Image (cartoon, rainbow, N blue to C red):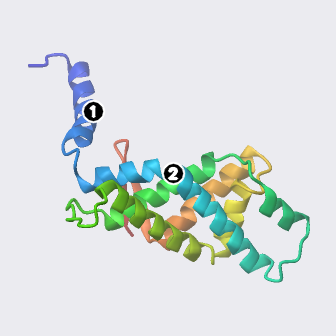
Amino acid sequence: MLQNPGLKRYFCSILPRLMIQKLFPLDKNYMLMQAQTALQEKGINLMIGELKLSYTRIYNPLGLEDDTYRQIMTTRRFPSEGVALIYQQLCGIYRYKYGSNQLEILFDGRTHVEKYGDDWLRQLQLWTRELGMIDGYVRTMLRMTLLYDGPSRATFAENRCKSLINEVFNVKIVKRNGDLKLKLA
């Protein structure tokens, strides 16, 4: 069949990824991933809104306006790469914890993608509220987004935030042979 060992290794590494993506296009997890990707901007905005509320609840419960508070409340533009990675991490945890391959029978006229998207946004809001009660999460998210002051600090904050989320959800990410796998710790 394939006599060249380099070519054989190439096909062995590429084919599983292609088969995973195309094996069952109507699988619930693919639809869920599609919904999460389509709702990324809305989800990030939701996360930032909850972050502002968490900051106010933890650090400024009286609502006194100082420079930091005004900066947090008025900042509209910030690098979104870090928060997008956190969003993707939460998406992966949701698919891992709530992803089965069984489609539900819907009687309300919505598509499965719409239903899974609504469920996802509801869960994301609950999770960001829970995470917003953790001081470390609020500080690292602020450092990556609304109080951004440079890429090196933002990278450090992003790594700390990912680690904190893994601890909160009791998830361990294992990298073997180039594949990332989620495991319950």
Kindly indicate the quadrant of the structure image that contains residue 1: top left
Kindly indicate the quadrant of the structure image that contains residue 56: bottom right
Residue nearer the viewer, 22 or 137: 22
Q: What residue appears at the point 56 percent right and 69 percent down from the top-left corner?
A: 128
Helix or strand or loop: what does disc 1 sit on?
A: helix
Q: Earlier in the sequence, mark 2 or mark 1?
A: 1
**Pointers 2 and 1 in contact (CB under 8 A)?**
no
Q: Residue 65 at x, y = what percent?
A: 89, 72
Q: What residue appears at the point 42 percent right and 66 percent down from the top-left corner?
A: 171
Nearer the camera: disc 2 or disc 1: 2
Residue nearer the viewer, 174 or 107: 107
- Residue at far front of view: 109
Kindly indicate the quadrant of the structure image that contains residue 133: bottom right
Q: Which amino acid does label 2 sit on?
A: Gln
Q: What residue appears at the point 25 percent right and 63 percent down from the top-left corner?
A: 100
Helix or strand or loop: what does disc 2 sit on?
A: helix
- Residue at far right of view: 66
Question: Does any portion of residue 95 appear in the rendered image?
Answer: no
Q: In this view, does 63 lie above or below 13?
A: below
Q: Residue 15 at x, y = what percent?
A: 22, 32
* Residue denoted by label 2: 40
Q: In the image, 76: left or right of 95? A: right
Q: Is residue 63 above or below residue 70?
A: below
Q: What residue appears at the point 67 percent right and 61 percent down from the top-left corner?
A: 141
* Residue denoted by label 1: 13
Q: How crowded is mark 1: few (under 14 residues within 10 Å), some or many (20 or more)?
A: few
Q: Which amino acid does label 1 sit on?
A: Ser
